[in-house]
Each structure stands twice: as C-alpha cells, then as structure tokens.
Amino acid sequence: MPITPHRPFLSGVPAWGVFPARGRALLYDLPIVLGGLATLYALLTFARYGVGVANTQAEIQLSPAALPKYAVFSLIRIAIAYALSFGFTLIRLSNVASGFPAGPIA
C-alpha cells in the first residue's frame, strides 16, 4: 500500500485534482488579470495629474502642419461620442426587448 501524505482539506480529491484539468485555464484568466493591471496603471497615471498644478492655458499651434493632428483629435472625439451613444442605444433596446417599458427615461 503506497503512503500518501495527510491532506484533510482535500479529502476525496486526487492529488492532481487541485490543478485545472486543462492547461488553457491560464489563457482564460490572463486577459482579465492584464485588464485589471492596465486599469490600475491608468488610474495611477491619471491620479498623478490630479495632484499637479492645473494648466489653464492651452497651447495651440497655429501652423498649417498641425491641422492634421487636430483633425485626428476631432475624429477620435466624434468616434468616442458615437460609440457611447450606440452602446447606450443597445443597452436601452435590450431592456425594452426583455420587457421593461419603453417610456422616457427619468
């Protein structure tokens, strides 16, 4: 009879039962962990600006070479507003489809 170590907290579980049966479990958890770390990094980065001196004077470049950069900034701002609006619409439509009343949001 082989000697097995005493494991009261794992009684009835084989020795390999404490590990995931598939090696791909890390692939499912890795994006969540990386997303959490990225969120923490973003919060710490933006918090750094909160304790600094506020710059109320914007530096606007008046050269024609700066126009494409400002156009890209405007397009990004428009795309973000569109994505937020579309996301809100999808959420509202799913609520209406699941049985919530379609009246005005108060």
Image: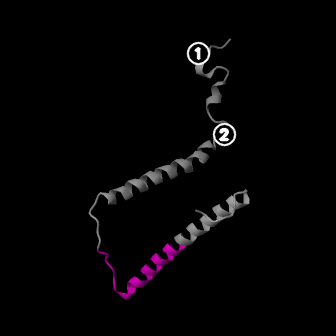
Q: Residues within 10 Å of mark 1 (few under 14, many from 20)?
A: few
- Judging depth in this view, the residue of 56 and 99 nearest the camera is 99
The answer to which image quadrant residue 9 occupies is: top right
Numbered marks: total: 2
For marks 2 and 1, the one nearer the N-term is 1
* Residue 22: assigned label: 2
Q: Position of residue 47 (x, y in %)?
A: 36, 56
Q: Position of residue 102 (x, y in %)?
A: 69, 64
- The magenta stretch spans which residues? 57-79
Asked if residue 70 is positioned above or below residue 45 in the image, the reply reads below
Which residue bears the numbered disc 1? 6
Answer whether labels 2 and 1 touch (C-beta < 8 Å).
no
Name, please, the residue furthest toward the left: 53
Q: Image quadrant for the C terminus?
A: bottom right
Give the Cα separation between the discs numbered 2 and 1: 26 Å
Which residue is painted at 28% across and 60% down in the image?
52
Q: Residue furthest bottom?
A: 64
**Whole-percent x and y of residue 58?**
32, 75
Q: Secondary structure at mark 2?
A: loop
SS assignment for the magenta stretch, majority? helix
> Residue 62 vs residue 77: left or right?
left
User: Judging from the image, what secondary structure is the residue with disc 1 in?
Assistant: loop
Q: Is residue 71 above or below residue 99?
A: below
Q: Is residue 65 magenta?
A: yes
Quadrant for residue 21, please give it: top right
Residue 7, visible in the rendered structure: no
**Amino acid at circle 1:** His
Q: Residue at x 52, y 75 (%)?
A: 78
The x and y percentages for residue 36 are 49, 50
